[in-house]
Amino acid sequence: MSVVEIKGVTKTFAQGNVTALEDIDLELEPGEFVSLIGPSGCGKSTLLRVIGDLTPPTSGSVTVNGKPARQARNDGDYGIVFQDAVLFDWRTVAKNIALPLEMLGWDRDRRKARVETMLDLVELRGFADHHPWQLSGGMQQRVSIARALAFEPALLLMDEPFGALDEMTRERLNLELLSIWEKLGSTVVFVTHSISEAVFLSTRVVVMSPRPGRIAGHVAIDLPFPRTVETREDPRFFELVTKVRELLRRRGEHLLPEEEELLEADR
Amino acid sequence: MKRIGEWVPALVVFAVVIAAWEGAISAFHIQQFLLPRPSDIVKTFWTARHSLWPAGWYTFKEALGGFAIGSGLGIVFATLVGRFKNVGTAVMPIAIAANAVPIIAFAPIFGAWFGEVSPHSKMAIAAVLCFLPVMVNTLRGLQSASPRQIELMRSYAASELEIWRRVRVPTALPFVFTALKVASVLAMIGAIVGEYFGGAFNALGVLINNGAQIFDFVTAWAGILVASLLGLALYGAVAGAERLVVRWAPDMRDA
Ligand SMILES: Nc1ncnc2c1ncn2[C@@H]1O[C@H](COP(=O)(O)OP(=O)(O)OP(=O)(O)O)[C@@H](O)[C@H]1O
Ligand SMILES: [Mg+2]
């Protein structure tokens, strides 16, 4: 059974008369790590929000774990990471991570044990009682990732989680994310603007094209696991990066100049 | 230790001002009725304690009552209005406009409504003074919850009530306390100025007013000292409560 099954999803926004998504079909198998990539405004965030039932599709259907998306949300079937960390200043790091566990009605001892595990996982042991503003941006993002992973959702939705980070932190968090994903065996939908990041992390890259937002194509990433720093030097890695870039270019006749530049910079 | 250290500059400035005041009166032979010596004011503060202190307490109770009623209603009203976004948008400009009205001007009218001598008219003035800033700020606080945080709560299947409790209220608390601190000062002003227009013979505002009229300026000044100390106490109590409740606020951390 697919973890996510999107059938003929169209999303239009009445404001501005925008067709953010048009006739999207996408299926995710258990354990897949799928990256969504495409120029700005092609509907990646919207697609993620539709999967998470944070915004309803105009038409078409979304099922998560075989259930309607609404049901899946109410069952807490997915964890979401937004582009910014979205932490609660009035909660400590530990309590931020424990929030979804509280919502699920876990008792105190169980929450405590899980929070400890998560703090270890994101290497923030010792920061449990800090407040978010006492952490660096990268640490905040790790808290947000720990929070999303805390209840071990079978499905992780991540919207440019590392977008605001410097290259070094980003690469380190990429490795951390992969090891977590391997440990938990969850399914990941990962939005990014970086071709190399998408290829490095994923089992499959889904390329989207803008106006209206459509799926331009899929690129299966057959690089071996575990992925390491050497992966980025693998000739196959470069082949796949080129493949994704060409798909982006071919479908991207509508690219704005600065988006062209962005793609160039990725080379 | 550091906390005490932070107070030192303020204390030094305070001591210097008082000393300069005391010195200026000797140096320039300033008449007692223009400006009494600080030492005389403190002396009267002590010798007249049997009339001044109970008067202070009497007025403080009026201020406290008005503060509690006005702030309480402000919070309740904002909470009700905040549940409905449209009502909030409709009420906000009116509340802000009403906030610009010099409410203290209503003092004689409140006297007519609630009894000129009665403490209730002072309480009413204090309450009205407190109501608007608390209402406006609480409403603003409740409405400034981050949409992303609310969306995150939705992803956990949180109910509206839970979003309210876990996102809107904590976001609003610093706003509420800022308003409560302003209100604590306004309440004391309201009560005392209210008494200038008539009040019980043992009320602080009446004592100050009478002192000024019979050229007993030292007593008037001592009354003002009592009022200031009580105003500070109320403000301090609110600030203390804020420290307990809003312990997490970034601007409160030890930098
Ligand atoms: N709430 C909304 N109301 C109206 N239009 C919206 C709304 N959200 C998104 N859109 C429109 O839908 C389109 C897709 O937006 P979306 O945020 O999904 O893009 P994206 O691919 O995530 O872009 P980026 O890479 O810049 O984050 C855009 O044209 C945007 O203007
Ligand atoms: Mg986006």
Image (cartoon, rainbow, N blue to C red):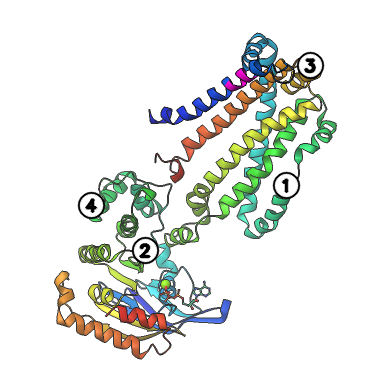
Q: Specify few, some or many for label 3: CA neighbours under 10 Å numbering under 14, 14-19, or 20 or more.
A: few
In the image: residue B209, left or right of residue A242: right
Q: Specify few, some or many for label 4: CA neighbours under 10 Å numbering under 14, 14-19, or 20 or more.
A: few
Task: Identify which residue, A249 or A174, lies in the foreground.
Answer: A249
> Could you confirm whether marks 2 and 1 are on the same chain?
no
Tell me the residue that label 2 is attached to.
Answer: A81
Give residue B120's quadrant in the image. top right
* Foreground: disc 2 or disc 1: 1
Judged from the image, the secondary structure of the residue bearing numbered disc 2 is strand
Q: Where is residue B150 in the image (x, y as percent from the top left)?
A: 48, 59
Judged from the image, the secondary structure of the residue bearing numbered disc 1 is loop
Judged from the image, the secondary structure of the residue bearing numbered disc 3 is loop
Give residue A34's quadrant in the image. bottom left
Mark number displayed over residue B100: 1
* Foreground: disc 4 or disc 1: 1
Q: Is residue A14 visible?
A: no
Tell me the residue that label 3 is attached to.
Answer: B215
Q: Where is residue B157 in the image (x, y as percent from the top left)?
A: 44, 60
Q: Can residue B180 be seen in this view?
A: yes
Q: Specify few, some or many for label 2: CA neighbours under 10 Å numbering under 14, 14-19, or 20 or more.
A: many
> Could you confirm whether marks 1 and 3 are on the same chain?
yes
The range drawn in magenta is B20-24
* Foreground: disc 1 or disc 3: 3
Q: Main secondary structure of the magenta part?
A: helix
Q: Which chain does the residue under circle 3 lie in?
A: B
Residue drawn at x 70%, y 36% as measured from the top left? B127
Q: In this view, does B174 lie above or below A240?
A: above
Q: Where is residue B232 in the image (x, y as percent from the top left)?
A: 59, 28
